[in-house]
């Protein structure tokens, strides 16, 4: 009991914007389960974020349910954590409005993700896309999270979150915990595209060979790894500068086997890239099979998943409401009490 009272809060979320990749898994989801004993963990399916790029309504609904099932299949225990869908807790939008009033357009327009996504979705550069980091700050600050496990690409958003927390605290008095990012030290924080190892592996890549999804079957996984771009010398050695493709495959192998990079280099010394890619492909495919089976089993029990979401949203709301009331009081909203 005593021990529970002093656990720090941790928050993270993933968007239900398509098939989840092994990049999302290694950089984020896999760590969620590992952290759940040491911290009070709150995990969300960020559907409000997902609609900042166009989504098919039926696909968004399906992806939301699938992502809840995937979290659990990856070891997130709804008995130990709060697991919920972002749009089920209105406080996220409510806090976003208040935080918008202390955020400057220049801060948002220079965000790397905004610039990338605006270029990729030039036909739909909407206010939500620009405001994305403020919604993300609200997610985190509502729960007074001290720690936020994310991939390296989210570091800039975390910095903005910290700035907004400090700005609000300075203006209105101590209100928010200023969160720290929790980003893996090793290169697992940024898994690169299999087709172009200078780019991050992204589920929205137009080339399906660039990424492995968590639901790819064994043959697909092996075939995609066989096609992975490497280099022209035939040495399995970790060297991000000169051998980004091979280094990325070694990182993936390390993430799925737990073997160190040095051990992996030794294992493949003297072997060709063909053998190496096949071994990585088989390893990943084998690791995905039990997760896929568990996810499929969970998806058959929609009542259970709906129950998890409902309970999650209620518990999340209880915490979020406290922070939001405090914020409303500090900014001077009349409460009628
Ligand atoms: P998109 O690639 O379509 O822009 P995304 O995968 O970056 O989307 P999310 O689904 O919200 O967006 O990401 C969920 C988590 O996965 C985040 O913590 C993010 O940092 C992490 N992540 C995403 N891509 C990678 C990657 N290639 N390597 C490591 N972590 C990643
Ligand atoms: N933007 C994040 C997803 C996300 C998130 C969050 C992560 C939305 N809200 C709060 C951590 C904390 C992404 O990974 N693309």
Image (spheres, rainbow, N blue to C red):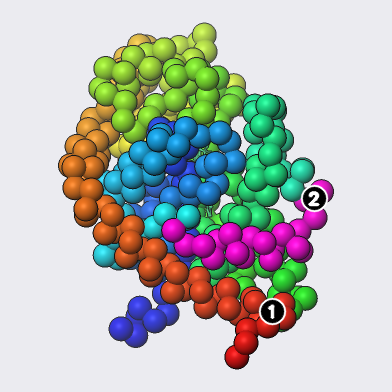
Residue 184 in the image: x percent, y percent?
A: 49, 48
Residue 284: x, y in percent?
31, 29
Q: Which residues are magenta?
A: 88-107
Q: In the rendered view, would you say 236 is above or below 149?
A: above
Q: Which part of the image, by quadrant, shows the N terminus?
A: bottom left
In the picture, measured across the screen, residue 300 lies left or right of residue 226, that is: left
Which structural element holds mark 2? Answer: helix
Nearer to the camera, 78 or 266: 78
Task: Give percent across and percent down for residue 228.
Answer: 44, 16
Q: At x 76% / y 75%, what residue is drawn?
A: 170
Q: Residue at x 33, y 57 (%)?
A: 309
Compared to residue 237, the image places residue 89 above or below, namely below
Magenta portion: prevailing SS class = helix
Residue 18's spot in the image, x, y percent? 44, 33
Q: Is residue 99 magenta?
A: yes
On residue 105, which mark appears? 2
Mark 2 vs 1, N-terminal side: 2
Q: In the displayed image of the protein, which residue is found farthest to the bottom?
A: 337
Residue 258 drawn in magenta: no
> Which residue has dot 1 on it?
333
Q: Is mark 1 within 8 Å of ligand 2?
A: no
Categorize mark 1 by other alpha carbons within 10 Å: few (<14), some (14-19), many (20+): few
134 to 271, vertically: above or below: below
Total marks in image: 2
Find numbered disc 1 in the image and state the secondary structure of the residue it sits on: loop
**Residue drawn at the location 52% of the way across and 13% of the way down:** 231
Could you tell me how far apart the alpha carbons at marks 2 and 1 are, in whole angstroms?
A: 24 Å
């Amino acid at each position: 009991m005593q021990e529970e009272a002093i656990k720090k809060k941790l928050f993270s979320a993933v968007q239900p914007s398509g098939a989840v990749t092994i990049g999302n898994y290694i950089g984020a989801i896999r760590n969620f389960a590992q952290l759940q004993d040491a911290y009070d963990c709150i995990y969300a399916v960020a559907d409000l974020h997902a609609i900042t790029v166009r989504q098919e309504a039926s696909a968004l609904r399906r992806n939301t349910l699938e992502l809840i099932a995937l979290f659990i299949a990856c070891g997130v225990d709804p008995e130990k954590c709060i697991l919920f869908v972002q749009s089920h807790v209105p406080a996220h939008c409510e806090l976003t409005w208040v935080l918008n009033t202390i955020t400057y357009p220049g801060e948002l327009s220079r965000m790397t993700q905004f610039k990338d996504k605006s270029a990729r979705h030039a036909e739909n550069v909407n206010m939500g896309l620009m405001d994305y980091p403020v919604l993300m700050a609200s997610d985190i600050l509502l729960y007074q999270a001290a720690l936020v496990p994310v991939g390296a690409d989210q570091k800039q958003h975390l910095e903005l979150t910290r700035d907004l927390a400090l700005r609000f605290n300075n203006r209105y008095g101590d209100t928010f915990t200023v969160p720290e990012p929790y980003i893996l030290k090793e290169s697992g924080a940024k898994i690169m595209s299999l087709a172009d190892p200078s780019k991050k592996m992204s589920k929205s890549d137009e080339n399906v060979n660039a990424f492995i999804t968590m639901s790819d079957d064994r043959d697909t996984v092996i075939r995609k790894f066989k096609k992975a771009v490497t280099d022209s010398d035939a040495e399995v050695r970790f060297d991000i500068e000169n051998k980004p493709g091979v280094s990325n495959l070694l990182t993936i192998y390390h993430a799925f086997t737990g073997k160190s990079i040095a051990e992996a280099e030794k294992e493949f010394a003297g072997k060709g890239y063909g053998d190496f890619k096949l071994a990585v492909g088989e390893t990943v495919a084998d690791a995905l099979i039990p997760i896929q089976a568990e996810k499929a089993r969970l998806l058959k029990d929609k009542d259970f998943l709906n129950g998890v979401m409902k309970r999650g949203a209620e518990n999340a709301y209880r915490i979020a409401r406290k922070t939001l009331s405090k914020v409303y009081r500090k900014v001077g909203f009349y409460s009628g009490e």
